[in-house]
Amino acid sequence: MNKVKTHLEQLHDHYLDRLKREKMVVRLYQLLIFAAFFSIWEISSKNNWIDPLIFSAPSKIWLLFLEKWQDGTLYANASVTIFETVLGFILGTLAGTLLAAILWWSPRLSRILDPYLVILNAMPKVALGPILIVAIGPGFFSIVAMGAIISVIITTIVVYTSFRGLDPNYLKVLQTFGASRLQLFKEAVLPASFPVIISSLKVNVGLSWVGVIVGEFLVSSKGFGYMIIYGFQVFNFTLVFLSLLLIAVFATIMYQLVDWLEKRLIKNSD
């Protein structure tokens, strides 16, 4: 018996070692691609293989980053965009989940609104930016609204589909024991849909950044979107690339936080 147990432990250790090695190999390739991309970019710019005025160079971007960091303008612009994005992300996710719950609660309302959801999802939400500015006013609220509105419809559709996907026989069993519709939602439908809701958070990270940056394109005096527009206006493409790289970095951090949250919640639910 002990020999069998020891053999199983060895197999398990071997399996864990193989997973660790695979993870290290993936990380190594990711770092190599990262280093190769910026090295090729730098060399190409230094040797004028690409136009350094348009495509800049990583070294120039780094120097501009240090300059903006030291004079405080980087923090001022980053804090504005991050706050607007996080707020739009939260509002869009909450509103989408709430709408999905309302649709699940009322099948008739769901049947009425179903074609409108499809139409709204197909519409380019960024086109609503000028309308929001006129309706809400040019400023913080219209930018946050852009960050929220761009993700709310897709969140509603995804979460509502998950609500409807729960086994109806399971719900019927609960109903036979006298469960009300509210109890069905709280005890069965919502907990079963947590993985989908968390997955929709990952999608909403990218959408919220797109919505906020587009909103800052249209009306803003601070933020990464403003930095990009200003860079285009004064032909400073190093500033444009710096803004784009910082957006990528902060979006990645936000995505990793959502991924961490997903692992924690799913692990706890298990």
Image (tube, rainbow, N blue to C red):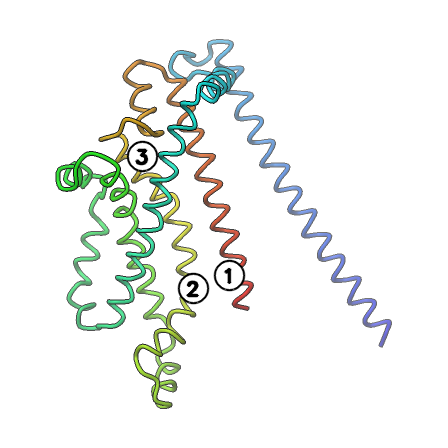
Q: Residues within 10 Å of mark 3 (few under 14, many from 20)?
A: many
At 20% from the left and 46% from the top, the residue drawn is 123
Q: Residues within 10 Å of mark 2 (few under 14, many from 20)?
A: some
Residues under labels 2 and 3: Cα distance? 29 Å
| Three-letter amino acid code of the residue under disc 3 | Ile
Q: Is residue 50 above or below residue 75?
A: above
Quick one: 7 or 236, which is closer to the camera?
Answer: 236
At 37% from the left and 28% from the top, the residue drawn is 77
- Residue 248: where, in percent of width, then height? 44, 34
Q: Is mark 3 on a helix, strand or loop?
A: helix
| Three-letter amino acid code of the residue under disc 1 | Leu
Q: Is mark 2 on a helix, strand or loop?
A: helix
Residue 157 lies in quadrant: bottom left
Q: Mark 1 points at which residue?
A: 265
Circle nearer the N terminus (3, 1): 3
| Three-letter amino acid code of the residue under disc 2 | Phe
Circle nearer the N terminus (2, 3): 2
Q: Which residue is situated farthest in the top direction here?
A: 47
Question: Left or right: 96 with respect to 136?
Answer: right
Question: Left or right: 187 with respect to 141?
Answer: right
Question: Left or right: 98 with respect to 197?
Answer: left
- Tag 2–tag 1 contact (CB < 8 Å): yes
- Residue 210: where, in percent of width, then height? 32, 39
Residues under labels 3 and 1: Cα distance? 30 Å
Q: Is mark 1 on a helix, strand or loop?
A: helix
Q: Which residue is situated farthest in the right direction here?
A: 3
Q: Mark 2 points at which residue?
A: 194
Q: Mark 3 points at which residue?
A: 213
At 34% from the left and 62% from the top, the residue drawn is 159
Q: Quick one: quadrant of the C terminus?
A: bottom right
Quick one: 194 or 162, which is closer to the camera?
Answer: 194
- Residue 38: where, in percent of width, then height? 53, 23
